[in-house]
Image (cartoon, rainbow, N blue to C red):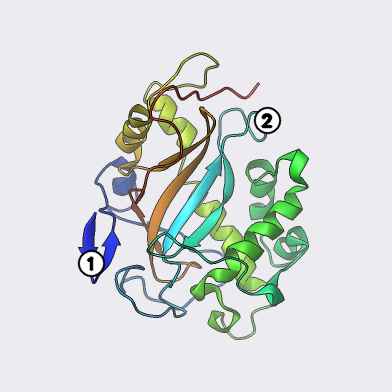
Amino acid sequence: MVALNGLLKPVVAAGSFAASLNGSSFNQRTESISSGCSTTGPLSCSSNAKGTCCFEAPGGLILQTQFWDTNPETGPTNSWTIHGLWPDNCDGSFSENCDPSRDYTDISGLLTAQGASSTLSFMEQFWLNDPDDGSNEEFWEHEWATHGTCYSTLQPSCLPEGSPKGAEAVAFFEQVVSLFKTLPTFEWLTNQGINPSSSTTHTYSALTAALEAEAGVIPALNCDGSDLNEIYWYFHLRGSVIDGDFVPISAPEKGDCPSNGIKWLPKN
C-alpha cells in the first residue's frame, strides 16, 4: 500500500493480466453510447475531488464480484458467474440504493429495446440468481438499484443528449459483462493446476498466489465456511464507467476465507 494525498492506494502489481490490458488497464467501449470523457485524466481514488461525469467518486474503488455456486449449482461447470460491479468508497466504506427514482424494472426489456440483446444473452448464461432467492430478473434489478445508481459517472445528466430512459443502466450491464469476460477465474486457477475437488484443500496464500501468477494482481477470496464461493477483483477507474479504463489493483484487504483447509468444490 502507498499513501497518495492522504488516501491509501493499493499498488498495481505487474503480470500477465496487466500486460494483456495494454500494460495497465482495460478499455471496453460499449456499443450504445459514448461518455465523451478522456481516458488520460486522473484515476479514481487519486484525490479527494468530488465525483463528476468523468471522475468516479466517492465510489472509486470498484469491485467486479463473482460467484462459485454449488448448492444449488448455477452457471456452467467451467466458469464462475457474475455477482456485480460495486463502487466502494476509497476507504472501503460504501453507499447503496442511491437513487430510488431510477430503480428500473424489466431489465431484459430495457436491454432488448436499446440494442443490447447480446449482452442479455450472455447474462442469461453467466449472471444467474440462486433459484431459492428469486429470478434472474430480480437479481439484475437488485444489482442496478443497489450499486449501479451510486456511480457518479452514470448519472442521467452525464448521458448524450437524447439518450433514452435507462440508457445508463444499459451501459452499466454492458460494462459489467465486458469486464467479466477479461477475468476468467476458472481458467486461471486450472492453468495453475488447481481444479475443483470435493477432497483437496488449499491455503489462502496458495490460491491467491496462483491467481496473482495469472492476473498480476491479488483478489480477495470469500468462503461459505471453508468452501470457496466468491471472489472480488478490484479496480480504479480513469474516465467513465461507460467507456473508461479499468486499472486492476490488488485487493486492499483479505477476504473472509480461512488461512487453510479451503475447498473449491466441483459443480455436479
**Residue 147 drawn at (x, y percent):** 58, 63
The image quadrant that residue 27 belongs to is bottom left
Q: Position of residue 256 (x, y in %)?
A: 46, 39
- Depth check, front residue: 235 or 263: 263
Q: In the image, what residue type sits under mark 2?
A: Glu
Q: Which mark is residue 73?
A: 2
Quadrant of image for the C terminus: top right
Q: Nearer the viewer, residue 175 or 130?
A: 130
Q: Quadrant of residue 51?
A: bottom left
Looking at the image, residue 103 lies above or below residue 13: below
- In three-dimensional space, the C-alpha distance between marks 1 and 2, rounded to whole angstroms, equals 43 Å
Which is nearer the eye, 51 or 77?
Answer: 51
Q: Quadrant of residue 109?
A: bottom right
Q: Residues within 10 Å of mark 2 (few under 14, many from 20)?
A: some
Q: Amino acid at mark 1?
A: Leu
Q: Disc 1 or 2, which lies upstream in sequence?
A: 1
SS for callout 1: strand
Task: Please indicate, yes or no, whether residue 34 appears anywhere in the rendered image.
Answer: no
* Residue at 30 percent of width and 41 percent of height: 16
Q: Secondary structure at mark 2?
A: loop
Marker count (numbered): 2
- Is 143 above or below relative to 233? below
Q: Residue 4 — which label? A: 1
Tell me the mark number nearer the camera, choosing from 1 and 2. 1
Side of 98 relative to 108 (left or right): left
Image quadrant occupied by the N terminus: bottom left
**Can residue 81 be spotted in the picture?**
yes
Other residues around mark 1 within 10 Å, as few (<14) / some (14–19) / many (≥20): few
Q: Position of residue 201 (x, y in %)?
A: 44, 19
The correct choice, above or below, for 207 with respect to 89 in the image is above
